[in-house]
Image (cartoon, grey):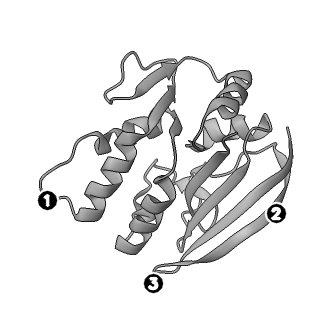
């Protein structure tokens, strides 16, 4: 059975983007980028909301001038299946990608039961639905040393869960911290 993992790059005050929707404060240095790539390498399926998918589509094509680590991440990203949850997106711009109109917890349970590789859920809104439905097994937060004062919260309001810390540590030399938790219980 595959695990459903929520991964978020977040500010120290808990936002994945600022009040203007920018997330440039989470731009990783080479070491952090390699850490993210190594985390993503074994993932079989990405669950995305429309906005995150549209940001990630950049990785569908290798571009001249990309570093070796950028090319590596692109290969990892292209190798995984992608499910995009959107009521407005009509077509996808990447291979191995399909659109779902609604988030169906039972379909995710079935996907977890049949997948041979772990699954990640991205963007806070979609992850919030999965957390509230009790579907998320683990949470990885990559915390960047910046306060942005508002924006989109990394973790959903209204969800309660007991978590167990599995790992922690600094990534690179820029003060980025990785926290890895297992969900013990979750309730809406």
72 sits to left or right of 123: left
Please name the residue shown 70% across and 32% down the image.
113
Residue farthest toward the front in the current orientation of the protein:
116
Residue farthest toward the left in the current orientation of the protein:
64
**Dot placed on the residue nearer the N-terminal end, 3 or 2:** 2
Secondary element at tag 2: strand
Secondary element at tag 3: loop
Please provide percent x and percent y for residue 143.
58, 67
Q: Which residue is mark 1?
A: 65
Please name the residue shown 56% across and 43% down the image.
123
The part of the image, by quadrant, that contains residue 148 is: bottom right
Of residues 113 and 33, the one nearer the viewer is: 113
Residue farthest toward the bottom in the current orientation of the protein:
173
Please provide percent x and percent y for residue 34.
40, 67
Q: Is residue 69 visible?
A: yes
Q: Where is 7 relative to 127, above or below?
A: below
Q: Which residue is mark 3?
A: 173
């Amino acid at each position: 059975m595959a695990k459903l993992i929520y991964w978020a790059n977040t500010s120290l005050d808990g936002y994945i983007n600022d009040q203007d929707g920018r997330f440039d404060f989470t731009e990783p240095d080479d070491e952090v980028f390699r850490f993210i790539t190594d985390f993503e390498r074994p993932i079989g399926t990405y669950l995305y909301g429309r906005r995150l998918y549209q940001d990630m589509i950049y990785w569908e094509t290798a571009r001249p001038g990309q570093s070796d680590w950028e090319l590596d991440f692109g290969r990892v990203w292209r190798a995984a299946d992608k499910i995009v949850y959107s009521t407005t997106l009509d077509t996808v711009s990447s291979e191995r990608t399909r659109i779902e109109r609604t988030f169906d917890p039972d379909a995710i349970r079935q996907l977890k039961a049949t997948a041979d590789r772990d699954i990640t859920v991205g963007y806070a809104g979609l992850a919030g639905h999965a957390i509230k439905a009790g579907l998320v097994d683990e949470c990885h937060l990559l915390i960047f040393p910046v306060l942005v004062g508002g924006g989109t919260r990394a973790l959903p309001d209204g969800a309660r869960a007991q978590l167990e810390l599995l790992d922690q540590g600094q990534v690179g030399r820029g003060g980025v911290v990785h926290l890895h938790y297992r969900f013990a219980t979750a309730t809406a």
